[in-house]
Structures are given as structure tokens and as C-alpha cells.
Image: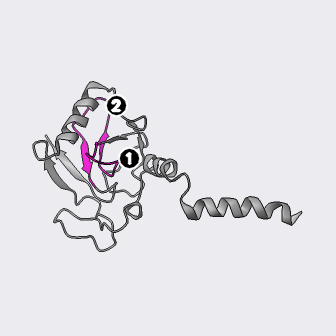
């Protein structure tokens, strides 16, 4: 009986170690509010631009970025959010749980995440905009270029 379980266990372990299904597991992590460990080799930065001691951005110490300082692709994503879509990726608008508590604390369902296209990328890349509040509202939005390791509040 024990031998019957050996092969499926080896296959499952191989899939985990080899990263099979990497994109689907990344999307699941992203929707749950990924941690800084999802962006290897890129330490999180606080508002001063220096890496946070724990490897994650200090909550409440967010930098800011104006809409004019955003990449053109982020400006386009904000336009799509305000218009209610259509969005280029099926995962745009999914729940962002803020499980790392890098953004202000709000009830579950407050934050949603959207992809910011990355020119030349073959996948969704690491850039995102996370907005809080009702859909189509862009007054409480944050930009990340390192897959949720750090955020900058988008100033009005």
C-alpha cells in the first residue's frame, strides 16, 4: 500500500521543485497579496529609498509618485481602471489582500490589483497598481514596480 503513494508523491515533489505551473502559482500568490520573497534579488525600499531592515517596506512609510512621474503604461492602466476596463489581463481587478500589511489596513475586499504592462516582457512582469475603495475609483492607488515588495502612493 505504501508503494502506491510513492510515485504520486515523487511527481508532486518534482513539480514543486521544478516550478511547473509557475505562472498559475504566481497568480494565486499575487491575488493573495504576495510578500517580498516573491521578488528575489530586489530588496524592498522605504520612503527614503533605502532598503528596509527586515527586507520589507515599513508600513506607513510609503513614498509618493505623481501621475506625471509614472511610466506611460501605468497612466494607461489608471485610465482603464477609471473607465472600468476592458483590461488586458484576466487577472486585472482581482482582490489584493494586503497580507504583508504594506498598505493601510482596510477590510478584506477593499484593495484590487491591476497589471501595468512592461514593454518587452513575455509575461505580466512585476509592475502593478493597487487601488482601494469602490471600483473605477483612483483616489487611493499605489504603484509597485517590484511585485508588491514596495509601494509608492500615487498622488492626485
Q: Is residue 13 above or below residue 54?
A: above
What's drawn in magenta, residue-wise?
A: 116-145
What residue is rendered at 30% in x and 68% in y? 43
What residue is rendered at 57% in x and 65% in y? 17
Q: Return the x and y of residue 71 as percentages of the image width and height.
A: 17, 45
What residue is rendered at 77% in x and 62% in y? 7
Residue that label 2 marks? 87
SS class, disc 1: loop
As for residue 139 lying within the magenta part, the answer is yes
Q: In which quarter of the image is the N terminus?
A: bottom right
Q: State the image quarter where residue 56 is shown.
A: bottom left
As for residue 115 lying within the magenta part, the answer is no
Q: Return the x and y of residue 118 as percentages of the image width and height.
A: 27, 46
The answer to whether residue 114 is left or right of residue 19 is left
The answer to whether residue 29 is left or right of residue 5 is left
Instruction: Report if the CB atoms under discs 2 and 1 are less than 8 Å apart.
Output: no
Q: Return the x and y of residue 105 as percentages of the image width and height.
A: 35, 50
Q: In this rendering, which labeled residue sits more in front, label 2 or label 1?
A: 1
Colour option used: one colour
The answer for how far apart the CA atoms under marks 2 and 1 are is 15 Å
SS class, disc 2: loop
Q: Is residue 80 above or below residue 34?
A: above
Q: Residues within 10 Å of mark 2 (few under 14, many from 20)?
A: some
Residue that label 1 marks? 123
Amino acid at each position: 500500500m505504501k508503494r502506491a503513494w510513492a510515485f504520486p508523491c515523487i511527481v508532486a515533489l518534482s513539480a514543486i521543485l521544478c516550478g511547473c505551473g509557475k505562472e498559475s502559482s504566481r497568480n494565486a500568490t499575487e491575488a493573495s497579496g504576495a510578500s517580498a520573497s516573491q521578488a528575489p534579488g530586489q530588496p524592498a525600499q522605504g520612503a527614503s529609498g533605502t532598503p528596509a531592515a527586515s527586507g520589507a517596506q515599513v508600513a506607513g512609510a510609503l513614498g509618493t509618485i505623481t501621475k506625471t512621474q509614472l511610466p506611460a503604461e501605468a497612466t494607461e492602466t489608471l485610465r482603464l481602471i477609471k473607465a472600468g476596463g476592458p483590461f488586458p489581463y484576466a487577472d486585472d481587478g482581482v482582490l489584493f489582500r494586503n497580507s504583508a500589511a504594506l498598505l493601510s489596513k482596510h477590510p478584506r475586499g477593499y484593495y484590487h490589483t491591476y497589471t501595468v504592462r512592461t514593454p518587452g516582457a513575455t509575461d505580466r512582469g512585476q509592475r502593478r497598481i493597487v487601488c482601494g475603495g469602490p471600483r473605477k475609483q483612483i483616489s487611493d492607488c499605489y504603484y509597485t514596480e517590484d511585485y508588491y515588495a514596495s509601494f509608492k502612493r500615487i498622488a492626485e
